[in-house]
Amino acid sequence: MPSLGWLRRQAVGWSLPQRPGTLAAALAAMEFVQADPIRAPARAQDLILRQRVRGYRAGGLDRHYPALDIDEDRLYAYGFVARRLRPILYPRRNVHAADGAFTLTDRAADVLAFVRERRIAHPRDVQAQFGQERVVNDWGGTSSATTLDLERLRHYGYLRVADRVAGVRRYELAPPLGDPLDPGDRLRAVALLIARTLAPVPEATLGTAVSFAVPWIRPPGGPRGGRPVIRDLLARGDLEAADVQGTRYVWPADLPPVETDPPARVRFLAPFDPVVWDRQRFGQLWGWEYRFEAYTPVAKRQLGYYAMPLLWRDRVIGWVNCAGAGQDVETGYVDRAPTGVRYAAALDAEIERLRTFLARV
């Protein structure tokens, strides 16, 4: 029967390689990397990749993106998705249309033709061609009408992000899709991908994460949430499950159990790293409440603006803050710092790795 110790070993061992590899190999293995724009000390995608890529430097994903087989896209969150997964993510239903169809407006068709002609188009150039009209966006504010057209064309698979210039997306035509896969097969594939990314994951958490993708994929009359998809995968034997202290955990059945003890290594993890992504699992595995406080008023912060969980072996024992390159690394502990030279040396080594990662290339 799995225990909390077993779950901790799998959570760390399944997600963090003992021997980091190349950027391309890490992305192929992970298939999804969550993104976040805050740089304190670096963006989430860079902090996630530095734990999995040999010699990785901040900004490396942006620099190499055009040559990599990945796309900016959304899974359970926005990030970078392996391009080979396009057939399970597209075509997408239009949740605002009764028949699920996305119909190009005249302006969107013109924007698409403009991108096709330019090959790569910056939103500024599209605005210059079609005007500065502003419309209400999905968050209740206003945005450039043509920029929203570009994003909708990307969301529905007509365009992809070619690269970024000073943080702004540039767009190009997306590769054509073949015949659509069965929606049920697509939903199961998406659920397994998310389960693999977050494994072992509470069943309720996986259900919520899968629910973000269900509306885009489900056929008429199909499941409206993620839980039916998970039950189907459990019945098929594609997922395994175990109850640990009142929480039902699931993971892909083909993941081999990690039997070895974790290395005596310190890691500073991104707040969105798969190891610490689920706050329910975090609290159960490590016995304390981690909070992401970037959007918390300063007076109410307890850990810091961008506190990064501090992992020692397979225990998250505290957090660190570092504002950026050349800044001090400040540590905090739930209880107290481990004693002994092995931890002190491992902490110093991780601080040095962080400084190298943040240094300008």
Image (cartoon, helix red, strand yellow):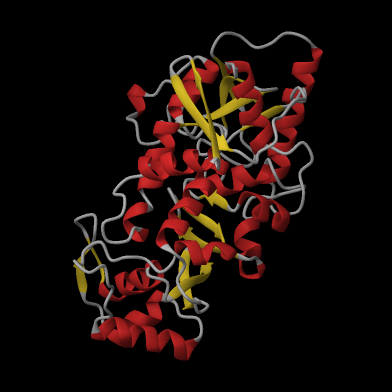
- Relative to 13, is 75 on the left or the right? left
Q: Can residue 90 be seen in this view?
A: yes
Quarter of the figure with residue 48? top right
Establish if 191 lies above or below 119.
Answer: above
Quarter of the figure with residue 113? bottom left
- Relative to 123, is 272 on the left or the right? right
Establish if 282 lies above or below 161.
Answer: above
x and y percent of residue 177 in the render? 49, 76
Q: Which residue is drawn at 54% across and 49% down?
A: 193
x and y percent of residue 67 in the render? 66, 69
Quarter of the image containing the N terminus? Answer: top right
Q: Which residue is drawn at 39% across and 39% down?
A: 207
x and y percent of residue 196 in the render? 57, 42
Residue lying farthest bottom? 117
In this view, the residue in front, 67 or 284, is 284
In this view, the residue in front, 108 or 341, is 108
Q: Which residue is drawn at 38% across and 77% down?
A: 124
Quarter of the figure with residue 138? bottom left
- Relative to 108, is 330 on the left or the right? right
In this view, the residue in front, 343 or 289, is 289
- Relative to 273, is 187 on the left or the right? left
Quarter of the image containing the C terminus? Answer: bottom right
Q: Can residue 290 be seen in this view?
A: no
In this view, the residue in front, 97 or 179, is 179
Establish if 125 lies above or below 318.
Answer: below
x and y percent of residue 118 in the render? 47, 88
